[in-house]
Amino acid sequence: MTNDIINNIIDINCKGNGGFHMKKKLILLVALILICSASLVACNSTPVPAAAWAGSEVLNYEVATTSGEIIGSMVCETKRKQSATFSNLIDDVNYENADNSFKMHLDTNKVEITTNILTKGYNTLAIKKVYVDKEDSENNYTVVAYHSGKYFYYTLNGEEQNRVKMSSGYTDSEFLYNYLRCYQLSSLPTDIKILDPLTKTIIEVGATNTGLTKVFEIAYPNGNISIQCNEVEIALNSSPVGKPIKVYYTPDQDEYNLSSFSMDVSKNFPVMIIENEITYRLTSVTIA
């Protein structure tokens, strides 16, 4: 049907002097149009995400034991400063330099953790974490912290302020997997500092990309797609190292990734996280 219409158009427009040469040119032009149209249809049929340049990205995870028992959910939301709902406040303190915000809400049968973080690029400016132990309220705590100069200042349960020297390479444990997204997976940091406010100590971990391994089916906003992902191992730098955490990130191709941080160095996002006996599996991606 399409070829008949094309031939009719060519025959009508190529009569008269020079018609043969005109016909050849039109055939080439129509062929080019058809090729371009086919390419566009093929591209549009591929379920790829759109970059969250001026909005938010929400990653939803199912939390389960390694035996498969579902015990809760985790929601991670990243917002750029351009988002209409972006806020640079934590506990009514305005962090004007913040250009990204991150919120993690973990709710399982044992604990509920809500973490709010403001960053400039991948550098942490301020944190508020509320930890609720559903089995023993004695373990509940709230940490509020901010970074200034060479020091990280923090308060635990509203008590006296403490400070530790952390000039670079620092993050919060709940933000660790998104922190790594801000690097190229081929050159991950090996000296990440994480503050443990309960023991008032700094834990140092390193990350290693072991290459493309498992295939995951990812629920992008416009359809599911199976992708072979990068395996990253995270382990303590001091003994005893113990069992490493494994995180699976999307591959490096832009069509599989999200541009949710202002610095825009890396876009890979975590599809699965395995922490000892707990697994966090991505169930959906929302972009606004």
Image (cartoon, rainbow, N blue to C red):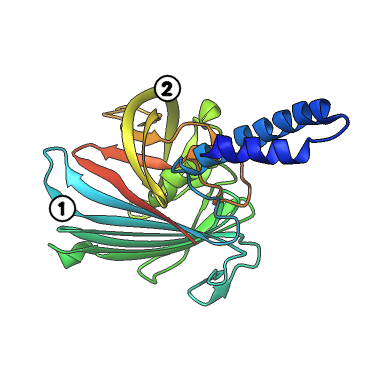
Farthest residue toward the right?
17
- Give x and y (percent) for residue 137: 18, 67
**Label 2 crowd bin: few (<14), some (14–19), many (20+), radius 10 Å:** some
- Give x and y (percent) for residue 3: 57, 34
Note whether 136 is above or below 74 in the view shown: below
Does dot 2 land on a helix, a strand or a loop?
A: strand
Q: Which residue is mark 2?
A: 211
**Label 1 crowd bin: few (<14), some (14–19), many (20+), radius 10 Å:** some
Farthest residue toward the bottom?
92
Looking at the rendered structure, the kind of residue marked 2 is Gly
Q: Name the residue rendered at 68%, 41% in the picture.
A: 9
What's the CA distance linking mark 1 and mark 2?
30 Å
- Is 81 in front, or is 54? 54
- Is 256 in front, or is 273? 256
Q: Name the residue rendered at 52%, 41% in the picture.
A: 41
Looking at the rendered structure, the kind of residue marked 1 is Ile
User: From where the camera sits, is residue 150 visible?
Assistant: yes
- Give x and y (percent) for residue 191: 50, 33
- Give x and y (percent) for residue 65: 15, 43
Residue 183's quadrant in the figure? top right
Asked if labels 2 and 1 touch by Cβ distance under 8 angstroms, the answer is no
Q: Which residue is mark 1?
A: 71
User: From where the camera sits, is residue 267 visible?
Assistant: no
Does dot 1 land on a helix, a strand or a loop?
A: strand
Farthest residue toward the front?
16
